């Protein structure tokens, strides 16, 4: 699992909805942005639910997902890239999956850095 923590200017996304929870709107904005933009890095996104984006490569579903949640007390958003490896995977499949996890992490960071309302990127764990 990899975690990308960053600052989101939640007020910039509140035009999407008049809800009082601007950061929830931002979470949905990030999920939607990733769904649209990860394709330019070779990843296909599968149907998503809320703030989670499932990912596939070359029409092969991968046990990878991206979930973004806010830590409103800190004013930060954390996108967590999670891998669900098969316990019976052979070592070559694990290496391949780890490589894809790293590529996906880089793609997520690059996609978010293109949006000026996000800043202060830092990898955790």
Image (cartoon, rainbow, N blue to C red):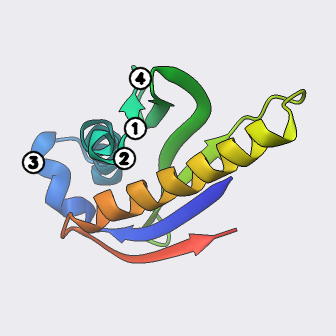
Q: Which residue is mark 1?
A: 43
Q: Which residue is mark 2?
A: 27
- Disc number lying in front (4 or 3): 4
Q: Which residue in the rendered view is the most extreme toward the right?
A: 88
- In front of the other: 120 or 59: 59
- In front of the other: 111 or 26: 111
- Disc number lying in front (3 or 1): 1
Q: CA distance from mark 4 to mark 3?
A: 26 Å
Q: Is residue 71 visible?
A: no
**Cβ atoms under marks 3 and 1 closer than 8 Å:** no
Other residues around mark 1 within 10 Å, as few (<14) / some (14–19) / many (≥20): many
| Between discs 1 and 2, the one toward the N terminus | 2
Q: Quadrant of residue 49?
A: top left
Left/right placement of residue 54 relative to residue 25 reads: right
Residue 48, image x, y percentages = 41, 25
**Cβ atoms under marks 4 and 3 closer than 8 Å:** no
**SS at circle 2:** helix
**Cβ atoms under marks 1 and 4 closer than 8 Å:** no
Q: Which residue is mark 4?
A: 46
56 shown above or below 124: above
80 shown above or below 10: above
Other residues around mark 2 within 10 Å, as few (<14) / some (14–19) / many (≥20): many
Residue 92, image x, y percentages = 78, 41
- In front of the other: 26 or 101: 101
**SS at circle 4:** loop
| Between discs 4 and 3, the one toward the N terminus | 3
Q: Which residue is mark 3?
A: 15
| Between discs 2 and 3, the one toward the N terminus | 3
Q: CA distance from mark 3 to mark 1?
A: 29 Å
């Amino acid at each position: 699992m990899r975690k990308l923590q960053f600052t989101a200017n939640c007020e910039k996304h509140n035009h999407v909805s008049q809800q009082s929870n601007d950061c929830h709107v931002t979470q949905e904005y990030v999920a939607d942005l990733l769904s649209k933009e990860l394709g330019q890095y070779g990843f296909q996104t599968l149907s998503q639910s809320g703030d989670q984006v499932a990912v596939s490569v070359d029409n092969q579903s991968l046990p990878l997902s991206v979930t973004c949640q806010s830590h409103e007390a800190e004013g930060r958003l954390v996108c967590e890239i999670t891998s669900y490896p098969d316990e019976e995977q052979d070592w070559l499949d694990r290496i391949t999956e780890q490589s894809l996890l790293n590529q996906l992490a880089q793609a997520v960071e690059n996609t978010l850095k293109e949006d000026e309302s996000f800043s202060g990127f830092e990898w955790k764990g």
